[in-house]
Image (spheres, rainbow, N blue to C red):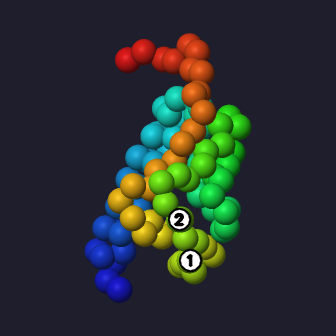
Amino acid sequence: MSISKLLIFLVVLNLLILCFSSAVLSAPKLIARWPLDEGSGNVIKDVVGGNDGEFVGGKLQWVSAKFEKGLEFPGENIHVAIKKILIWNLPTR
């Protein structure tokens, strides 16, 4: 690899790191996060706020994926039902 290509690569890498880190620092506090990594069943866990959800409207299938298990949505009507999330003191823009 030539020096100029290496320098371009390093500049782009530094810009990506800078953009990512500033986006993370300026992000508001999460109120919910569903990583969808259960691997089985119809319930999805909220790892932040305890607002678990459930797949409804069809049979969800967990299949082998690139990293462990993944979701396969076999139909158009399947969705996630989540209890109402109470949100207080949301930041205004």
Residue depicted at x 42% and y 15%: 92
Q: Quadrant of the C terminus?
A: top left
Q: Position of residue 11 (x, y in %)?
A: 36, 60
Residue depicted at x 39% and y 55%: 77
The circle on residue 59 is: 2
Quarter of the image for residue 51 reads: top right
Q: Is residue 64 above or below residue 39?
A: below
Q: Position of residue 1 (x, y in %)?
A: 35, 86
Residue depicted at x 51% and y 18%: 90
Q: Position of residue 54 (x, y in %)?
A: 60, 49
- Residue 64 or 13: which is nearer the viewer? 64
The circle on residue 63 is: 1
SS category of the residue bearing label 2: loop
Give the amino acid at mark 1.
Val
Q: Can residue 90 be seen in this snapshot? A: yes
Q: Is residue 55 above or below residue 68?
A: above
- Residue 60 or 90: which is nearer the viewer? 60
Side of 23 relative to 40 (left or right): left
Q: Position of residue 16 (x, y in %)?
A: 40, 55
Give the amino acid at mark 2.
Lys
- Residue 67 or 72: which is nearer the viewer? 72
SS category of the residue bearing label 1: strand
Q: Nearer the observer, disc 2 or disc 1?
A: 2
Quarter of the image for residue 74 reads: bottom left
